[in-house]
Amino acid sequence: MSASAIKIDEMAEDQDNDFVPPKQEKKAPNHMYGTIGAKIGWRDCGGEKGRGVFALEDIPKGTIIEVGPVIPVAADAIPEEGGAPDGYLLDWDPDEEGEEHCMVCGYIMMTNHSKNPTMYLENNYEEMTVTSYAIRDIKAGEELTWDYSCDIWFDEEEG
C-alpha cells in the first residue's frame, strides 16, 4: 500500500461521531446490490460470467441509465504482458496523449457483453463521462448489456 493510501477502517476511527456500521451478514448467492433510489443493481451471475447489472424496475427506451465519470489512462501505463488495469479499460481518446484509454466509474464496468444489447454508450470528451442509454424497453429483472465491439475472449451466449 502506498504511503498516501488510507484504509477505510482508519478513516472510520478518525471520525468524530457515534456511528457504528451494522454487521455485514453473509449475502445469498443472487443478492442484488444497489444504491438508494437506484433503478439498477448488480449481482453475481454465477459461473464464468461473473457479475452483471440488472434493472430493478422497468426502464423505457431512450432513458439515460447512468452517467459515469472516467479516469483517463495513458497507453504507456498498461503493462505489455497485460494484467490489471488492462481488461478493465475502454478506448477513450486516441488523439490525446495520456488519455488513450479510460476506466469508467460506476456500474458500466460491470455490465456484460451481448450481440443483442439493451443499452449503448456515448463518450463525452469535454465532460470526461460515458453515458449509457436504453436502446429498447428493458423489463425489471432483465440484465443490462452492451456490445463491446471488439474480439470477444470468451464463449458468447445469446441473451
Image (cartoon, rainbow, N blue to C red):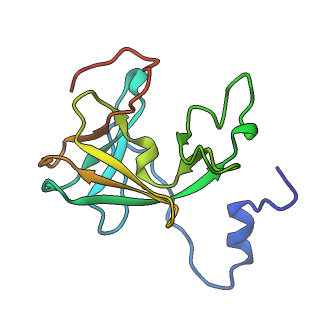
Q: In this view, does 117 lie above or below 12?
A: above
Task: State whether residue 29 appears in this view.
Answer: no
**Res 10 → quadrant:** bottom right
Question: Observer-nearest residue: 138 or 49?
Answer: 138
- Residue furthest to the right: 3
Report x, y in % for residue 68: 45, 59
Task: State whether residue 46 appears in this view.
Answer: yes
Question: Observer-nearest residue: 94 or 80?
Answer: 94
Query: Total label count?
Result: 0
**Res 60 → quadrant:** bottom left
Report x, y in % for residue 48: 42, 21
Q: Residue at x 46, y 44 (%)?
A: 109
Q: Is residue 116 left or right of residue 49?
A: left
Report x, y in % for residue 54: 27, 45
Q: Is residue 97 left or right of residue 151?
A: right
Q: Residue at x 18, y 57 (%)?
A: 62
Q: In this view, does 37 lie above or below 134?
A: below
Q: Which residue is drawn at 60% across and 83% down?
A: 18
Report x, y in % for residue 147: 33, 33
Q: Which residue is drawn at 62% across and 44% down?
A: 100
